Amino acid sequence: MTPTATSAARALDAVPGVSPWLRRLAALASLTVLPSCVWRLAIAAGVPMGWGPGSDLHHSYYPGRESLVLVLVTVLQEALGLLSLGLVQRWGEELPRRLPWLGGRRIHPLVAVVPAALGALALTAITCLGAVTWNEVNAANPDAPTGLALWIFNLSYAPLLLWGPLLGVLAVAYWRRRRVHG
């Protein structure tokens, strides 16, 4: 794509009142899920990730039928992460015209704000609780990862701590913008 075509594509997708800072925040929010998804897919593929033989996540169970569950959870998490982008892009305010029967219809602000705000609260609570209690859970489970595998696990899941707060900021900005710009 040429620089002019890229500029034109951005102009078509530009939303009044969305700063470049908010666009970067939305991109960051959507990327926070990626490391844990990659970690989960590695398990689904049978890569040893430090779980002992007594764990459901031990590599000897994968790949197999159980891998499908991990892949579906990953796809769902990625899809939810990508929805963060809708809070700063045109398709988050108006359904794309190419959609049959619904294309071109405006999205009521509450249809986006309520799930985003509830999701932000839930994600923040779940990830913070998980971060606070992980050492207790890990200590109680002899099959949990240790050493390097534990570091990889922590680095994969740590970005999720940002997802909820970032989503909350985006939801508030979306609500304020839609109240002003319609």
Image (cartoon, grey):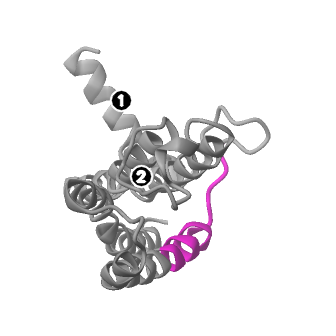
**Residue at the top extreme of this rendering:** 2
Q: Which residue is mark 1?
A: 9
Circle number at residue 85 = 2
State the image coordinates of residue 168 (x, y, percent, origin top left): 38, 75
- Position of residue 69 relative to residue 128, above or below, is above
Q: Residues within 10 Å of mark 1 (few under 14, many from 20)?
A: few
Counting residues from the N terminus, which is met first, the one under dot 1 or under dot 2?
1
State the image coordinates of residue 70 (x, y, percent, origin top left): 57, 48
- SS majority, magenta: helix
Q: Amino acid at mark 1?
A: Ala
- Position of residue 118 relative to residue 144, above or below, is below
Instruction: Please give left or right for residue 40 compared with residue 99 in the image.
Output: left
Instruction: Please give left or right for residue 141 compared with residue 154 in the image.
Output: right
Foreground: 99 or 144? 144
Q: Residues within 10 Å of mark 2 (few under 14, many from 20)?
A: many
Residue under the point 33% across and 36% down: 11
Instruction: Please give left or right for residue 176 compared with residue 4 in the image.
Output: right
- Position of residue 41 relative to residue 106, above or below, is above
Please tell me whether mark 2 sits on a helix, a strand or a loop.
helix
Q: Which residues are magenta?
A: 104-119
Residue under the point 68% across and 40% down: 65
Foreground: 179 or 144? 144
Please tell me whether mark 1 sits on a helix, a strand or a loop.
helix
**Residue at the right extreme of this rendering:** 101
Q: Amino acid at mark 2?
A: Leu
Residue 125 placement: quadrant: bottom left
Residue under the point 46% across and 68% down: 178
As measured in the structure, the alpha-carbon distance from the residue carrying label 1 to the one carrying label 2 is 16 Å
